[in-house]
Image: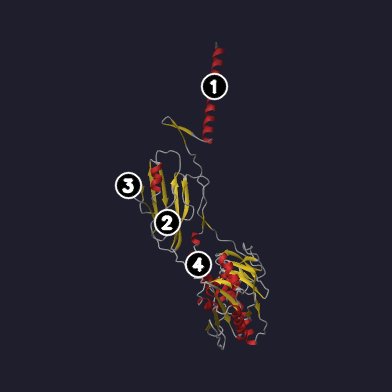
Amino acid sequence: MYGSRRTLFLVIVLSGSLLALFYAGMVFWSKNSLPVMRLSNCHHVSEIPDFPRPNIGPFRNENPAPCTCQKTNPANQFVSKDDMDDLQKRRAEEFRQHQIRSGKENDVLLLVPANTPLQYPMRGFRVTPMNKTLIPGLALQTQKRAVYKVSLRVHKGVLSVMNVQEGEQVEGQNEQHLSISSSSLQQLNDLLSRLTYTSTIYHIKTEDLAYFSFENHEVIFPIEIRRLSVPVLFDMGKDVNSQVTVLVKAFLRYNELNVLINSIRVNYPKIKIIVADDSLNPEKVVGDNIEHYIMPPAQGWFAGRNLAVSQVTTKYFLWVDDDFVFLNETRIESFVNIMEAVPELDVVGGQVGGNQFAFQLKYEEGNSEEGGCITRVTRTHAPLPGFKGCFFADGVVNYFLGRTEAVRRVGFDPFLKRVAHTEFFIDGLGDLLVATCKGLSIGHQKHGSTNKYGSYRHPPRSDSQAKMTHHFFKNHLKCIKY
């Protein structure tokens, strides 16, 4: 009898232990397996697991690492030690303002979540300053809930839902933070379709970020705030004379200039020629459809370029030096055909005396304290599709067709008087689309420079040092290598 009771007791203990282990296993499985199923009102409802919230941004671009120009001296070595501290402070402040003007404060990275029930405009949503605009594409797609609630927040504007009816639950009308809730998913999405954004600041080019959330999901999308710009168009007319103006910067070399003009008139008797002249003792330059602008003496090449470009009324201009000469195969129409076929192009360069000089500008932004590094290398980027012998580049030889409006936006720095060409393309890097093409040829006159011209053409070392100091500040450069 005693043995039977003992056996029964052991069976009960073992059974209880097994049940406990089974229950513990079920609890462990339920906590570590998906999906979790719970009973609610006698119906099975699948719950979305509570994943860790992903970090989707915005991520600010960190200050880049310092850059290096090998085998060249830093630009600031030409700055006086007495002036360095003050110059550095002024440069840092100017660079800070440049970052704001260029929209760098809005230069952020946003990541789209791998899976979210929220629908939203990822890019391309643009508003005009202080004007109410519907936000396109907002919607929620999810499983059945007793109540659905979404919220949005912005920083540079306010949100509102248009035509809110009685019973529609909207909180935060005309505020930076707005929430919408409803027991009907269809009604919620209808309210989202009427959601508007109005910027509260006036700015012609900036950006806001909208944060859109539902339960543990949040997405971020950009709102571009832009003032609409007015197109600037040029009437192409019927022939090359109404399409292109020939520009020349003249200095001392009147014999060569007259040879150039006469060679242009062989095939282009009516095309307008603009001459910017800063000679020490100017001579008259006469002829049909020639505009001769006299400048103060020795103002420099870039000052003359600026003057000449400012007077252009045609869509394009052709830049030539005063010692070039048009050949029988020099056809301005070939330049125009390329530019018209590829409207994105801003500059197309040719060949001078068989020399098709073109280059890349390798630019590292560097950090905000030291500045960037630029190295010029003689090579091109990639072929220009559809045009054999044409290649994209960052800079070209001093014989090119320029899109007037685009070149005016970049301009020519009049500080650079004597030796300057690459510098124009440095200023236009990232703004001008440049190409170089074989077969677009012009000649180069053979001549001997006068001693006076040579003294200006080859300035003293002090000018080069001043130029490096200028680049150090103006282009926020640590070093530059040609």
Q: Secondary structure at mark 3?
A: loop
Mark sitting earlier along the chain (4/1): 1
Q: Residue at x 60, y 86 (%)?
A: 254
Q: Earlier in the sequence, mark 4 or mark 3?
A: 4
Label 4, label 3: how many angstroms apart (C-alpha)?
Answer: 47 Å
Q: Is residue 6 above or below residue 18?
A: above
Question: Which residue is depicted at the point 36% across and 47% down?
Answer: 170
* Mark 3: amino acid: Gln
Q: Is residue 166 left or right of residue 204?
A: left
Q: CA distance from mark 2 to mark 4?
A: 22 Å
Return the residue at label 4. 98
Residue that appears at 43% across and 38% down: 144
SS of the residue under disc 4? helix
Residue holding disc 2: 155
Image quarter hosting the N terminus:
top right
Task: Sort mark 1 into few (<14), some (14-19) or many (20+) by Cα contacts within 10 Å.
Answer: few
Looking at the rendered structure, the kind of residue marked 1 is: Ser
| Residue for badge 1 | 15
Number of numbered labels in the structure image: 4
Q: Check the picture and name the quadrant holding the C terminus.
A: bottom right
Question: Residue at the location (59% across, 67% down)?
Answer: 338
Q: Secondary structure at mark 2?
A: loop
* Front label number (2 vs 3): 3
Amino acid type for the residue under numbered disc 4: His
Q: Position of residue 175 (x, y in %)?
A: 37, 54
**Residue 189 visible somewhere in the drawing:** yes
Q: Identify the disc placed on residue 165.
A: 3
Quarter location, residue 413: bottom right
